[in-house]
Image: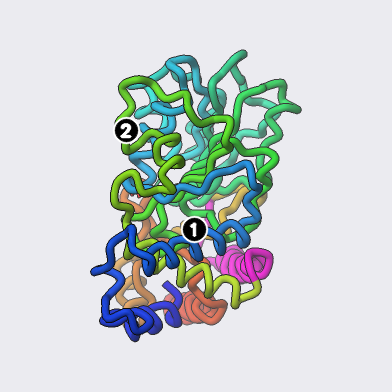
Amino acid sequence: MPQEVLTEAASEMLDWHGSGMSVMEMSHRGKEFISIYEQAEADLRELLAVPGNFKILFMQGGGLAENAIVPLNLSRGGVADFVVTGSWSQKSQQEARKYCTVNIAASSETDGHTTLPDPTTWQLSQGASYVHVCTNETINGVEYHALPDLKALGSDAPLVIDFSSQVASRPVDWSRVGLAFGGAQKNLGPAGLTLVVVREDLLGHALPVCPSAFNYKTVADNQSMYNTPPTYAIYIAGLVFQWLKRQGGIAAMEARNKAKAALLYDAIDNSQLYLNKVAGNCRSRMNVPFFLHDESLNEAFLAGARAHGLLQLKGHKSVGGMRASIYNALPLEGVQALVDYLHEFEKTRS
Ligand SMILES: *Cc1c(COP(=O)(O)O)cnc(C)c1O
């Protein structure tokens, strides 16, 4: 979270703009919260340049719930294509099997998800209801740096992207997307809010078994207020959107994220002690997994990092090693502090 946003939220936590209420105490249908909601939606639409024929939905359930909600709404019980590039897309295809037929169009499992299957090699099905791609695999640290053009690949299906850990870090080419979803907690705000951006023509085809609160058309027709939305999380995300605008918007964030990632990957590549296994053309700008060649040093490395105020560097248990998540809110100085520590730790060990 950007420090500025936390400070602002703290200062108005007890009394929002002289309303005499905390945002947590407001009715979601009252004029105060409606103004917060409308500002947040308008700011997000502007920041991400979301076209007018897409709906922005503020939902609950997180990325994992969307793994069910997407096939419930889009599959029509048919076939959906999945590109398996790491832990998250693996989970997505597994969940979708409850609601539709799954075709694995491509997988990078054999190389331990350190490369990304080139779109020209994907085995797409004829008449698929959608094609699912996780554009940034948070755990494995692989990222598609361009969205596939499904039409050019001979598929008429809409592209569904899980951009949970990529949203707002770079622009989105909406001409290639049918639906994008993401949990807010990586780059947008607190956990509990799930963002869905969906092209209007994809609404209204949910399976009869789809829960009403998870039917995109119902959610869209009710401005995300069919049931009570996660109001406080929407408010905080709204403060993040204002912060993003003050930073210069998404293009400025992308430039900053490129610089941050380059600084860290260069330090890892130029060392004798650290190693990143991901192929150069698909390294994530948000999540940087790395290993110590001598894994017996892992605990000493982490303890030293903690002593420098560098927290949460332990890698995901399924991959091991270390992982630096360098989301939007982390300034370049934060990455520089990590790089300085990498050098310092390496010196003491050689
Ligand atoms: C974190 C994450 C999720 C899971 O989101 P939850 O909100 O925990 O359900 C899904 N996909 C990706 C790519 C993620 O990074």
Q: In the rendering, which numbered label is found on residue 287? A: 1
Q: Is mark 2 within 8 Å of ligand 1?
A: no
The residue positioned farthest toward the left in the image shown: 25
- Give the residue displayed 66% in from the left and 44% down from the top: 174
In the image, 53 versus 313, the foreground residue is 53
Q: Quadrant of residue 98?
A: top left
Q: Which residue is mark 2?
A: 212
Secondary structure type for disc 2: helix
Of 146 and 346, nearer the camera is 146
Marks 1 and 2, Cα distance to the nearest angstrom? 35 Å
* Amino acid identity at mark 2: Ser
In the picture shown, does residue 9 fall above or below 126?
Answer: below
Q: Inspect this view and state whether residue 266 appears.
A: no
Q: Position of residue 8 (x, y in %)?
A: 40, 82
Other-residue count near label 2 (Cα within 10 Å), few / some / many at <14 / 14–19 / ≥20:
some
- How many C-alpha atoms fall within 10 Å of the one at disc 1: few (<14), some, or many (≥20)? many
User: Which residues are the magenta region?
Assistant: 249-277
Residue at position x 51%, y 58% in the image: 41
Residue 155 image point, x, y percent: 67, 22
Res 93 visible? yes
The colour scheme used here is rainbow
**Residue at point 47%, 23% (across, down):** 205
Coordinates of residue 238 in the picture (x, y in percent): 46, 67
Image side of residue 215 versus residue 241, left or right: left
Question: Which residue is at 66% across, 22% downward?
Answer: 156
Q: Amino acid at mark 1?
A: Asn
Q: Residue furthest right?
A: 152
**Image coordinates for residue 103, horizontal then vertical, percent:** 50, 19
Q: Secondary structure at mark 1?
A: strand
Q: Residue 25 magenta-drawn?
A: no
